[in-house]
Image (tube, grey):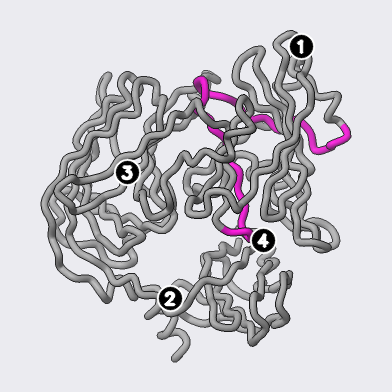
Amino acid sequence: MTKSLHFLGWILLSSLSLFAQEGQEHNVEVNTEAGYKKSAFVKLTDTPEGAKVTYITDSSWDLAFRRDNDMDKGIRVNMSKFGAIQVLEASSDLAQWNAISYTDESQTTMPVLYNSNDNIFQGALDNGSASQNMGPNGTLHIGWGTYQMSDHSIRGNRIFLLKYSATKYVKMYVVKYLAAYTIKYAISDGIGGWQADQEATISNATNPNSYFNYFSFENPSNSTQTILEPTKKQWDFMFTNDYEVVPGMGVYYSYGLILQNPEAAVAITAEGNTALPVENDYQEASNTIGKDFKVLSGYSYVPSTQNYYIKTEDGDLYKINFLTFEGSSTGKFSFKYKKVGRLSTSSFDDKVKFDIVPNPAIDKRINLIYEVAQEGLSTIAVFSLTGALVYESQLNAASGLHNQVIDLSRYPAGVYMVKVHTANQSQIKKVILK
C-alpha cells in the first residue's frame, strides 16, 4: 500500500502543488501561409510580449529522426513537402534494392504508411510491417528493422518509397541505428531510373536540446547541422497540417493540425465551465487538440467553443480558446490565452534510459531494454492506473545495456505504468497490454 500511495503521489505531484496565479490575456495569430507551407512552434509566456512563435519551412526537410534518447527511436516523414506525398513500403527484402522500380504498377499493392499523430515520436517508417512485435526466437521487429541482441543496434530490413510526384521518388532504408541513424537512399532520375546510391549518418549528438534532427535528400551535407525546431523547453504547441484520404474517392485533402510538446498535457472542458480540470482530465497524446479545434460550417471553419488547458513542461498552466481558423487558403490560426496557475515541477528522481518493446504488447510479454550507467541495485515496478503495484522484480545491476523479458500475461488488458530504477536514477513510461 505504501508503494501504491508513493507512486500516486509522484504522478499527482503537479495537481497537489497548484498555485493560483492568473495572468493577463494574450491574443496570438499563427500564419503557416497558404497551403500550410510552414509549421509553427508556439511557446506560451505571461510576459508583456506574449507568445513566441518560431516557423520552419516545410520544404527544407524530408525526414525527422528522434534524437533525445539513445534508447528510443522514431522516424517521421514530412508528408507536406511539395503537397501530399505518399510513403510506401516497397519490400521486406533488402536484396531487392536494385530491382525497386517506380514505373510499374506494383505501387498499387504496396502498403501506404502514415505518421502517428497521437504519438509525435511514432513516424510513418515506424509503422512499417515490421511494426513492434516479437518474432520467432525472441526477435524484436521495430517498424523498419530488427533489434540486435549482440550490440543493441537496430538493423534495417524494409525498403521504402517516398512518392513526391509521378516522376519524383526516393527509395531508402535504414542501414543501422545505434546512437545514430545510417540510411541508404537513391533519388529518381526522372526518366525511369535512379541516381547513384548515397549513404548518410544522422547522429543523436547533433542538436542535443531538440527532440528531432532533420534531414533533406536534396541538401544532405548541411541538413544535419541545421537546427529547425526550437529546443524542447522553447515550445508548447506545433501548428502544422496532415493529410487524409477522402473515403470512397481515393484523393487526399489537407487539414490543420495542432500537436503538443511530449512533456506537456492538455485537458478540454465544455464552454461555460469555469472549473479547472482535475488531474485525470489531462491527456498526454500528442493530438489531444489535434484537428478537432474547429468544425466545418458550410464553406468555412468555425472554432470550437471548448476550453483547452495546457500544463507546460516548465510548470505553467494556461487556458486557451481558439478564435479563428481560415483553412488551407491562408494557413492562419488565431487564439487567446491566459495563465491561470503554476504547478510544482519538482521531481523525485533523475531519468534512466529504457525502452519497452513491443508496445502495445499483444501477448502481454515485453522486452525491457535498459541501460545501467552505474552498477547498483536495479528494479522494475509495474503499476495500474489506480496506483496499485502489480509487478516488481530486480534487474541485472551490472553497468551496460541489458535486455530482459517481462511476462505480464497474468494481468488484465489495459494501460500500465512501468518504473525502472537503477542506482540513483529512475524513469516512468506507459505500456499498453492487449
The span from disc 2 to disc 4 (Cα, nearest Å) is 23 Å
Q: Which residue is labeled 3 in the image?
A: 42
Pair 4/1: label in front: 1
Where does the image place residue 211, in percent across and percent down from the top left?
A: 50, 50
Please state if 207 lies on the left or on the right of 128 as rendered.
left
The span from disc 1 to disc 2 (Cα, nearest Å) is 58 Å
Q: Which residue is labeled 2 in the image?
A: 386
Q: Which residue is labeled 4 in the image?
A: 357
Residue type indicated by callout 2: Thr
Instruction: Determine which quarter of the picture holds residue 302.
Output: top left
Q: Counting other residues with Cα less than 10 Å from the Cα at mark 1, is it few (<14), some (14-19), or many (20 or more)?
A: few
Q: Which residue is labeled 1 in the image?
A: 192
Where does the image place residue 145, in percent across and percent down from the top left?
A: 75, 47
The span from disc 3 to disc 4 (Cα, nearest Å) is 32 Å
**Label whose residue precedes the other's in the sequence (3 or 4):** 3
**Label whose residue precedes the other's in the sequence (1 or 3):** 3
